[in-house]
Structures are given as structure tokens and as C-alpha cells.
Image (tube, rainbow, N blue to C red):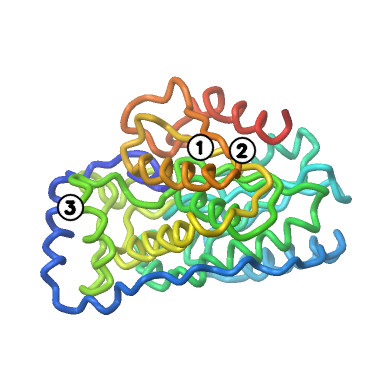
Amino acid sequence: MGGAPFGGRWVIDRHDFTTLLGASLLAPALSACAGTAVEEPSPAVTPAPFADTVRTIRAAIARDAADPLILPAGLSRLYEHGRPTEHAVVLFHGFTNCPQQFDELARGYYARGCNVYVPRIPHHGLKDRLTRDLDNLTVGKLERFADETFVLARGLGTSVAALGLSLGGALVLWLAKTQPIDLAVPIAPFLLPLPDPQFVGAPALRLLLTIPSMYWWWDVRIKEHTKPDYAYPGYTTHAIAELVFLGDAIRAGASATKPRARRCVIVLNELDNAVDNRVTRSLLATWNRDGAGYRELVLAGIPPRRHDVIDPTTFPQGRTLVYPVLESLVLG
């Protein structure tokens, strides 16, 4: 989702991963796994004037820049032309990564005339790469963060496109469900990780909150030396559970309530080793049965065992294999 494996490599053996989680099925405290309520559509909000929007975003960036706990590479980015543009683009980074992951792509959109906002997801981008602050991540925080980001982006341009990788892709799906966004492009969205076997992985992940949070390395061989340097080399299991609950919230009521995005293109990697494409395709099919008209785009030429197709530090091939595809979706 941003570091590795959800942002590059899955080195933890998945059999061990799901065996450990499967053991939690025997835990007695199951009340934390209550069902997710169906969300009501958010009311329409008048976009703020461009100047007010820019001031709000830059003030938030300045507050983060003054915070000694936040990494400079972890700061949100705003690339704007001094006026509203035809296209406003929001880029949501992945789990355990930070806005630096999307900086090069953001500059590409900016060079082609877009106003671009790359916000820092809560509890990401800290200087302490071994932080356990991710334990403070919640579904409610993620939903509010996505909604507030969309409200800001509406002040930057005539149309709003949101793109995001993994956790960022899930945030884009949340917006597709709840907001009248012009274009939603979730890239390898995290709804459930790729399980082995599926009937163990899904329920076990939902039960992670019933046991003490653990810290797991993305790559157990090199631990804190995992690249990129501005991403966390590991994650907490409670944070993973919250991401699963976010996926539940996105899928809740999908067959009963039409999504609100005007257009949505779900970008998948057929050889993704981190997220379960079947779950994403099931959601897409459900939405399309109700006439959404959304579509799927499968990336070509991506090597096996690759999830983060954005960060040029770990996947420089993305500049030629992925960036042009994403730019064309927004700009034609």
C-alpha cells in the first residue's frame, strides 16, 4: 500500500500470515467485529473560492512543516497555477508511504495545466519510521479525511479527479460511493489483502482488533532498511484491521445504493501480490448492475509480485508503464 509489500514486496510468507490470523478466530472477544452501517450520501457543499481553498491548504502544510515529528518528504503538496483550472487532481498515497510517493506524477499533471493536491493521510509521514502511531488510525478518520479533501479540491478546478494507490485507492472508492466526484481512479485498491486461503484471511483480519496490536515488518530480512527511506518499514496489525473495516464500509449497501461518482476507472495489476482483485471486481460488478457504467483497466507489462506501481524510488518503470496511462485517464 505504500511501503512494501503493500507498496512493493510481500516477503512475509502468506501461509504464516494467515495461520497467525486464523488463530485469532478462536479468540472469545468478537463484539468488536460488528457490522458496518450503510452510509447516507453526503449533502452537496458549495465549493469555496479558489483563494480561500489555497490559503486553507497552505496553512495546513505550514502547520505540518512546523511540527518536528513530521518528515519534510511527508508534507502534503499543492501545485497550483494561481487560478482555478479545468482539471483539479487529488493524489492519495499508499499505506505506510507519504506524499513523496506521488510527487513526480503530481508534477507531471501540474506541467499539463492541472492544479494538483497531494494530501498526507493521518498518522503517515512521521520522521520516526518505526512509529506505532498507525494504531491511532480509524475508519472514521479515513472517511472524514477523504471527504474533507474532496471539499477542498472542488475549489481548485472545474472538475475533480481523485487517484490513489492501495489505501489511497480505497479512499478514492469511498469518494466514488459518497461524493459526486467527476472521475475516480482507484489503483490496486485495498479492500482485502490477497488471502491464503480466502475463508481464513477475511474473517481473521476482521478479528485483529480483538487481540493486542503487533508490529510486523514489510520485509523481515532487512527490517528497518526497507526502501523508500520516507516510508515506514512496517505496520501495526490494528491499522490493517481498520483498513479492512474501511473496505467493509465501502462495500456496505453496494447493491442497494448507487455510487455517486460520475466516472470511475478501477486500475488493476493482474499479478498484484498484495490485494485481492476478486473483491474489487465484485464491487465493480455490483455497482454496474445498477447502471453505474464504471470500467476496469488492467495494467500491462507489470512484473510479478508488484503492488506499488507508483513510487519511482522502488519502481522506476512506472514512469513509462503507468504514468502515461493515468495521465490519459484524466486529460485524454
> Between disc 3 and disc 1, whose residue precedes?
3
Considering only vertical position in the picture, is 324 above or below 249? Answer: above
Considering only vertical position in the picture, is 25 above or below 175? Answer: below
What element does badge 3 sit on?
helix
For label 3, the residue is 18
Residue occupying image coordinates x 22% and y 48%: 198
The number of numbered badges drawn on the structure is: 3
Query: Which amino acid lies under the numbered mark 3 shown in the image of this protein?
Result: Thr
* Spatial CA span between label 3 and label 1: 27 Å
| Residue depth check, mark 2 versus mark 1: number of the one nearer the observer | 1
> Between disc 2 and disc 3, whose residue precedes?
3
Query: Are discs 2 and 1 less than 8 Å apart at CB?
Result: no
Residue occupying image coordinates x 67% and y 63%: 61
Q: Where is residue 98 shown, x and y percent of the image?
A: 51, 53
Query: Which amino acid lies under the numbered mark 2 shown in the image of this protein?
Result: Glu
Q: Where is residue 270 shown, x and y percent of the image?
A: 38, 30
Residue occupying image coordinates x 78% and y 47%: 159
For label 1, the residue is 310
Q: Quadrant of residue 59?
A: bottom right
Query: Which amino acid lies under the numbered mark 1 shown in the image of this protein?
Result: Ile
